[in-house]
Structure formats: C-alpha cells, structure tokens
C-alpha cells in the first residue's frame, strides 16, 4: 500500500470553492457529497494529478476555514508548466495576488496568491536547475527583515 498526503481544506461556501478551483486551476471535481442542509461534507478534486479534499466549514465540529480563523499558516503549492497563465487565470477567477510572479533564485518562476476562501497558494514553473551550493550561497545573502508579511 502506498502512502499519500491529501490536503483537506475547509471553505466558507465549498460549492463556490469547487467552481473557483475549476476555473482557476482546471480542477476536476471527482465527487461532492452534501448534507441534508446542502453543505458539502466531503468532496474531492483533482488538480493536475494531485487530489485535494474540499468541505464546508463546520465550526461546531472544529472545522473552520481561514476566513473564520483570520488567515492560514499553510500554503498549497502548484508546480505547473506555465506559471504566468495559471496565475493570471486564478486572478481572473477571483484570487488576490500576494506576490506577483517573478524569477526566483532557487530556479523557479514563482508567485503567491490567496483564493477567495482564504487559502494561500504558491504557483511555480521551474525555469533553471540550481545546485545545492548555489542555493545555499543565495540563501546566505537573504535579509529576512526585507520580507513583507
């Protein structure tokens, strides 16, 4: 039996989140199971071969979305063939740019966005190979005080 890790994210209005992920990332909805009141208790989407579970908030059971929590410490990462097209499509679908797409020292063209449901996504395309030594040298030059949070 193989081991997998599947993100399981709570969204305020999971039905709209499923629509957003289809528009923004080309997700395929694999299943969506609703409670009698219409809330989604379980759904699964496939984004380029990766599965993500999406559910509605159930705060009475401890299931809160980033909107209820005031943010998230988690970033979901998408490695894609064309970061610019994916990023632009996500913005057009309603995401907010947190960091515009740019070439990064670790060899990726990379951007960061927040979806309308409060989840943070990084999107990248590898544009060049970087050796471990080159990466460490670049990290050594970083000034974390310049980071904007």
Image: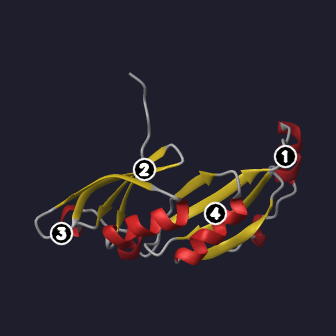
- Mark nearest the camera among 4 and 1 is 4
User: What is the C-alpha distance between the residues marked 3 and 2?
Assistant: 22 Å
Residue indicated by mark 1: 128
Left or right of 37? Residue 72 is: right
Left or right of 93? Residue 34 is: left
- Mark nearest the camera among 2 and 1 is 1
First reached walking from the N terminus: tag 4 or tag 1:
4
Whether residues under marks 4 and 1 lie with C-beta atoms below 8 angstroms apart, the answer is no
First reached walking from the N terminus: tag 4 or tag 2:
2
Q: Position of residue 25 (x, y in %)?
A: 54, 60
Residue at image x 50%, y 59%? 74
The answer to whether residue 95 is seen in the rendering is no
Residue indicated by mark 2: 7
Residue indicated by mark 4: 86
Assign a secondary structure to mark 4: helix
User: What is the C-alpha distance between the residues marked 4 and 1?
Assistant: 19 Å
User: What is the C-alpha distance between the residues marked 3 and 1?
Assistant: 46 Å
The answer to whether residue 18 is seen in the rendering is yes
Looking at the image, which is closer to me, 112 or 18?
Answer: 18
- Mark nearest the camera among 3 and 2 is 3
First reached walking from the N terminus: tag 3 or tag 4:
3
Q: Which mark is residue 89?
A: none
Residue indicated by mark 3: 38
Which class describes the residues within 10 Å of circle 1: few (<14), some (14-19), or many (20+)?
few
- Mark nearest the camera among 3 and 1 is 3
Q: Is residue 107 above or below residue 39?
A: above
Left or right of 20? Residue 35 is: left
Which class describes the residues within 10 Å of circle 2: few (<14), some (14-19), or many (20+)?
few
Assign a secondary structure to mark 1: loop
User: What is the C-alpha distance between the residues marked 2 and 1?
Assistant: 28 Å
Which class describes the residues within 10 Å of circle 3: few (<14), some (14-19), or many (20+)?
few
**Quadrant of residue 70 in the image?**
bottom left
């Amino acid at each position: 039996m193989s081991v997998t890790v599947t993100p399981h994210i709570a969204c305020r209005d999971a039905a709209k989140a499923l629509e957003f992920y289809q528009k923004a990332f080309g997700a395929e909805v694999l299943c969506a199971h609703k409670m009698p009141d219409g809330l989604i208790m379980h759904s699964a989407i496939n984004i380029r071969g990766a599965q993500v579970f999406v559910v509605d908030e159930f705060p009475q059971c401890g299931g809160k979305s980033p909107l209820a929590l005031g943010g998230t410490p988690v970033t979901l990462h998408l490695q894609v063939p064309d970061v610019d097209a994916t990023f632009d499509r996500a913005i057009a679908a309603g995401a907010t740019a947190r960091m515009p797409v740019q070439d990064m020292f670790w060899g990726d063209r990379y951007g960061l966005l927040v979806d309308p449901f409060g989840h943070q996504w990084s999107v990248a395309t590898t544009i060049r190979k970087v050796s471990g030594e080159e990466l460490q040298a670049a990290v050594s030059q970083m000034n974390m005080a310049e980071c904007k949070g």
